[in-house]
Image (cartoon, grey):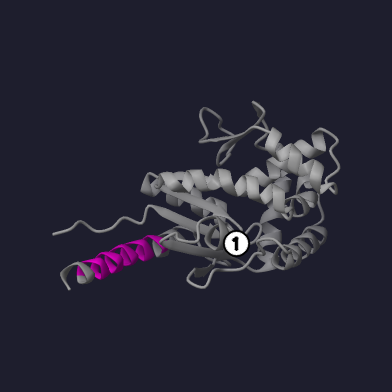
């Protein structure tokens, strides 16, 4: 008897602060897969532009910077600061700086540039080709890994996502208004869903999961059940084709 086909590439998309990064990381840990949050790559380019005084409104300059910047993503090592991963920009740890309000403000614009997306998608697909990866972003199932055997779209209400972002900023020492954060979340949703290149939306065969008011454990159990069902469905389908 053939062994069940493994779901070794999982694409997770969703809007800002939906919980997709936390869910993706914990899912990758349970499966023993690599966790890759592609959003941090766009944040890294945005931060590099801000630090190097490259105008974020200059698409050509930001695209050139993307090709010239070395972005490293690794699992956390000895850090005990709650990070989900370590991001280095040209060898310098920038993990928490990526979450600054300035980066929040400009990352949607930077990520809308075709040249930036083309280069970072190229890098992301190299990870997908290796398999055993949980990849998180905004266009993973629709653009980066359209053939992924399991696609998830993680979402939550705008108010819930704003609350999570407000709490994160409080913990990081940033004083921010909840109303201002909610307005920024809604602005970014509108921008990301209507941009010309790779707009944010669930793929036709993605499973949508709303995390509002739900525990992480409950959501992970639902996804693990989906993986088991999907594996056996694929296996049964392939066995039928093989035996026909």
Q: Looking at this view, is 59 or 103 the one in front?
A: 59
The reply, left or right, for residue 152 in relation to residue 174 is left
The reply, left or right, for residue 26 in relation to residue 240 is right
Dominant secondary structure, magenta: helix
- Residue 238 counted in the magenta span: yes
The reply, left or right, for residue 144 in relation to residue 129 is right
Q: Looking at this view, is 198 or 192 the one in front?
A: 198
Q: Which residue is mark 1?
A: 14
The reply, left or right, for residue 234 in relation to residue 73 is left
Q: Residues within 10 Å of mark 1 (few under 14, many from 20)?
A: many
Residue drawn at x 81%, y 38% is 50
Where's residue 223, x and y in %? 42, 62
Q: Is residue 12 above or below residue 127?
A: below
Q: Is residue 156 visible?
A: yes
At numbered mark 1, what does the secondary structure look like: helix, strand or loop? Answer: loop
Residue drawn at x 34%, y 66% is 230
Could you say which quadrant of the image residue 241 lies in?
bottom left
Q: Looking at this view, is 68 or 82 the one in front?
A: 68
Could you say which quadrant of the image residue 236 lies in?
bottom left
Q: Is residue 128 above or below residue 231?
A: above
Q: Is residue 172 visible?
A: no
Residue drawn at x 71%, y 60% is 162
Where's residue 35, x and y in %? 49, 45
Quadrant of the image containing the C terminus:
bottom left
Magenta stretch?
223-239
Where's residue 204, x and y in %? 52, 73
Quadrant of the image containing the N terminus:
bottom left
């Amino acid at each position: 008897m053939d062994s069940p086909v493994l779901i070794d590439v999982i694409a997770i998309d969703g809007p800002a602060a939906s919980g997709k990064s936390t869910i993706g990381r914990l899912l990758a840990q349970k499966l023993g897969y690599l966790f890759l949050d592609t959003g941090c790559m766009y944040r890294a380019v945005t931060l590099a532009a801000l630090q190097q005084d490259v105008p974020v409104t200059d698409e050509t300059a930001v695209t050139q910077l993307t090709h010239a910047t070395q972005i490293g993503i690794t699992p956390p090592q000895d850090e005990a600061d709650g990070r989900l991963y370590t991001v280095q920009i040209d060898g310098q740890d920038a993990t928490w700086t990526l979450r600054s309000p300035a980066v929040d403000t400009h990352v949607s614009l930077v990520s809308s540039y075709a040249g930036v997306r083309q280069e970072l998608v190229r890098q992301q697909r190299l990870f997908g080709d290796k398999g055993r990866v949980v990849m998180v972003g905004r266009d993973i199932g629709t653009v980066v890994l359209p053939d992924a055997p399991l696609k998830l779209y993680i979402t939550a209400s705008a108010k819930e996502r704003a609350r999570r972002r407000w709490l994160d900023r409080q913990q990081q020492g940033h004083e921010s208004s909840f109303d201002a954060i909610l307005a920024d979340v809604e602005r970014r949703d509108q921008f990301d869903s209507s941009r010309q290149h790779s707009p944010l939306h669930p793929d036709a065969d993605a499973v949508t999961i709303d995390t509002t008011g739900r525990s992480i454990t409950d959501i992970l159990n639902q996804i693990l059940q989906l993986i088991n069902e999907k594996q056996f469905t694929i296996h049964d389908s392939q066995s039928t084709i093989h035996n026909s």
